[in-house]
Amino acid sequence: MKNVTVIAGPASEDLARKIARKLKAPLQKTQLRVFPDGESKVTFNSKPKSGTCVIVESTYPPVDTHMIHLLSIVAKAREHSSKVILVVPYLGYARQDKEFLGGEIVTIKVIAKLFKAVGVSKIIVVDIHSKLALGYFKIQKKNVSAIPALVNEIKRMKLKNPLIVSPDKGGIERAKKFAQLFGTNHIALDKRRNRKTGKVTIESKELEEVRGRDLVVIDDMISSGGSIIKAAEFLKKKKCGKIMVGCTHALLINDAENRIKKAGVSKILSTNTIPGSTAVVDVSGIIADEIT
Ligand code: R5P
């Protein structure tokens, strides 16, 4: 694609630089100033370019703050550019994709309308939580998968008779795809979450197949760590071998990483959709491939 500029939002500078390098496109940075009342002011380092802008900004915590930065950057870029492609590697609010309890607002639907209103032509996300969430975006859209890259990374570990585990039934397709690429089999636990309290329980019963095997627990994201901790505690009781965890988006709120390790997980691997200590898999290449 000709006449492309990559714009780095404050939350995703490193990933934006890598994408720009892959596209052989110039990188434009933004600067952030936060006022005493908490309002943000995002400023472009130079005048936004005409042509196509690729804006890269992940919306990990503080989610609402990153979301407003992103909307502001798109609105400004759109004043000068003919086309805005928005890369949101981790799309916050994607879990709020339906009315689970009466009266709830489907916030991802609101976000989808906002993106269109500020002038986004195409959105690229990585392993979005649900297809339902993506369905609300009435613009060009692409969900890229980091699973093959995660498989390659985890294959380098020396695992004994590995079994792929999804912590819940909703993630079974992800675990199946992962297992196929890995060349092994998969299972899904029966996780329940109380919609009012958020408390997680694992309701699975006998699971003879995990005994003595190294496990790779796969999820789209880790937030508080509650799901992975419950899964790991349950699997340890079933006398499994080593437990590894692979996910695309590691939010790891508060001390989630330590609590997960304490629950018996030997390693957590994630991608750089969210920067952090576990983010060893680079998704810039699979994102750049979609910018055509
Ligand atoms: C749920 O369906 C998701 O795939 C994740 O399992 C969940 O959102 C992770 O959240 P937490 O780490 O707080 O349990």
Image: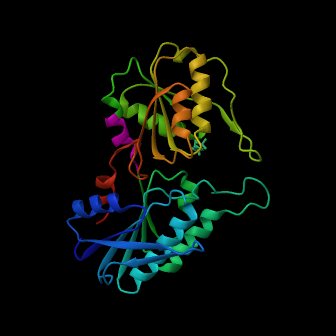
- Find residue 185 and report its image quarter: top left
The residue positioned 33% from the left and 58% from the top of the image is: 14
- Out of 89 and 46, give the one closest to the viewer: 46
Q: Quadrant of the C terminus?
A: bottom left
Q: Residue at x 55, y 41 (%)?
A: 255
Return the residue found at the far front: 36
Does the rendering let one see residue 278? yes
Q: Who is closer to the viewer here, 60 or 153?
A: 60
Region rendered in magenta: 145-153
The correct choice, above or below, for 253 with respect to 269 in the image is below
Q: Predominant secondary structure in magenta?
A: helix
Q: Is residue 120 left or right of residue 46?
A: right
Image quadrant where one finds the N terminus: bottom left
Q: Whole-percent x and y of residue 111? A: 57, 68
Residue 82 % position (x, y): 35, 83
Q: In what quadrant does ligand 1 lie? A: top right
The residue sitting at the bottom extreme is 79
On the image, the x and y values in percent for residue 183 come to 36, 27
